[in-house]
Amino acid sequence: VNRTEALELVKDSISRVVPGADLDALGPDDSFRDALEMDSLDFLGFIEALSSRSGVRIEDEDTRHLTTLSGTADFLVARAG
Amino acid sequence: MGAFTMPSLGADMDEGTLQEWLVKPGERVRKGEAVAVVETAKSTVEVECFESGTVEQLLVEPGTTVPVGTALALIAPFARAREARGGPDGTVEETPPRPEPRRAAPPSGTEAARAPTPTPARAHEHSEAGPLLRHLAERSGLEWEALHGSGPGGRVTRGDVERAAGAARPPRIRATPLAKRLAAELHVDLGTLRGTGTDGAVRAADVRSAAPGGATTPTPAHRAARPRAAEDRASARRQAIAALMTRANRDIPHYYLSTTVDMAAAMDWLHEHNRRNPVGERLLPAALLLKAAACAAREVPELNGFWVDGGFVPGDGVHLGVAVSLRGGGLVAPALHDADTLDLRQLMAGLKDLVVRARTGRLRGSEVSAPTLTVNNLGDQGVETVYGVIYPPQVALVGFGRVVDRPSAVDGLLGVRPVVTATLSADHRATDGAVGARYLTAVDRLLRNPEQL
């Protein structure tokens, strides 16, 4: 995956769990979890969606790095190789 | 013949709007199957029927708001339906009379609204005599003692309550959906109109000609009303919560207990489980907290049930209410049925499903009406301690805050451990502090031994 594809995957996965989320209003370094008021179930849904779309297995320990669009995209690029 | 009635979906519900029928006349339905979508002040709910049979007649049109207990449809049990069809003669007389709102002569008083003669001793009525019926009676403005019981041993059945409630209700007005909407918009009382439609049903034209200023086009008013709908809905939801919580704070003498639970073992177990399993089967701390709350409720049944008419009535299982906040504001607390018997995987799957449906507005009636004890987990909102208000007629509410790392003494040494604050709000009429303490102690013990959950 390249960076642009990774970012799209992240946005797609967020839209799955928060339908109608205004992703354009979200800065690359904003905490989307706070901005979109995602609770732990929403966040788990996001991780599931992202994991299945990217084929990257995401562990509990990884999730604390996955708070911003840009951080999550970087993570995917690094893991997917 | 059974009447499928507007169910009570919580202590705070007086009326509901039939939004959509999920079945058609002639269709076969099974007990527990969703047959209609009902909108209450708080949520939209799929309502199940309590009897298997064939849908005979739909009595209420979508968009109509009716009080709890109103007959919505007639469902003929399978055996009876066959009998009525197959009988060569005379069988018609065995079929109980159904309400005939279409009668040519205008019905006098309450006659048309009277519920049909009940099938004697329906199976589900046995289990229902109890707190919920008393509530239904109370809500319908009926004196419990004055009700005539037709069940075994003179027990009052749901049918008895509904009949009595039905007798007290005004007759239904037949009108087309458009006519009803127009009547509401033009402030016309449908009851004062003479219908010119089929079987005397009130048509839109009847409403228009009766409206002050004669015919009006409905479109602008309707369109103008649209944007308000969401606002009205949020406000109605707020009002429903306000009424219920006011009642809780007025009637229930709450006492509050709190304890800090060491979550180190639970979190280790959880992370280990998540490492070993596919992402789709991952557990959240909430699953462990809910399971512990449910198992503790089984151990301390005094907190699992209802306070009704000055006495405690235990729940028929641990149906754990889970407080779910809605995106548009407000919250609902639908039930995870028999949560104490589910393994963690099932409980997690049930929780996910429940939350999704709570937010998309497709809960089932049995989930909304049944919780025996509610859990409020505000950990996601970042708070550490929850002092909750009990949902009447329940007698306790369990609160969990966020799992946080705190310095803590373990075996004489200071270490940093994940902990969670568990609180209990309990009804002092039903229990004393010692019982509450026993409950929180059980929660603590269960969470320290996650492999047993």
Image (cartoon, coloured by chain):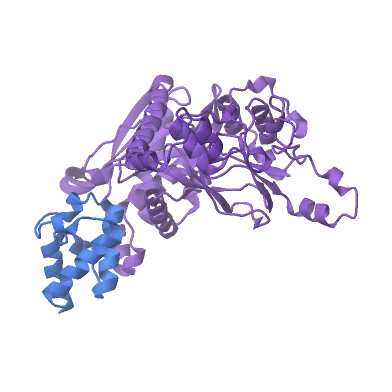
Relative image position of residue B424 (x, y in whole percent): 36, 33
Q: Residue at x 63, y 20 (%)?
A: B143
Q: Is residue B423 left or right of residue B47?
A: left
Q: Nearer the viewer, residue A37 or B314?
A: A37
Where B185 falls versus A70 (above or below)? above
Q: Residue at x 39, y 35 (%)?
A: B397
Q: Nearer the viewer, residue B180 or A58?
A: B180
Q: Is residue B265 left or right of residue B5?
A: left
* Chain coloured blue: A
Where A74 falls versus B167 (above or below)? below
* Chain coloured purple: B
Q: Nearer the viewer, residue B390 or B111?
A: B111
**How many numbered marks have been drawn onto this rendered protein structure?**
0
Q: Quadrant of residue B227?
A: top left
Pick the quarter of the image with the N terminus of chain B: top right
Relative image position of residue A52 (x, y in whole percent): 29, 71
Q: Which residue appears farthest toward the front when viewing the image? A: B214
Relative image position of residue A61 (x, y in whole percent): 20, 62
Q: Is residue A33 left or right of residue B209?
A: left
Q: Residue at x 63, y 52 (%)?
A: B31
Q: Is residue B298 visible to the viewer in this orientation of the structure?
A: no
Where B376 falls versus B347 (above or below)? above
Q: Is residue B37 visible to the viewer in this orientation of the structure?
A: yes
Relative image position of residue B32 (x, y in whole percent): 59, 51
Q: Which residue appears farthest toward the right when viewing the image? A: B89
Where B171 falls versus B219 (above or below)? above
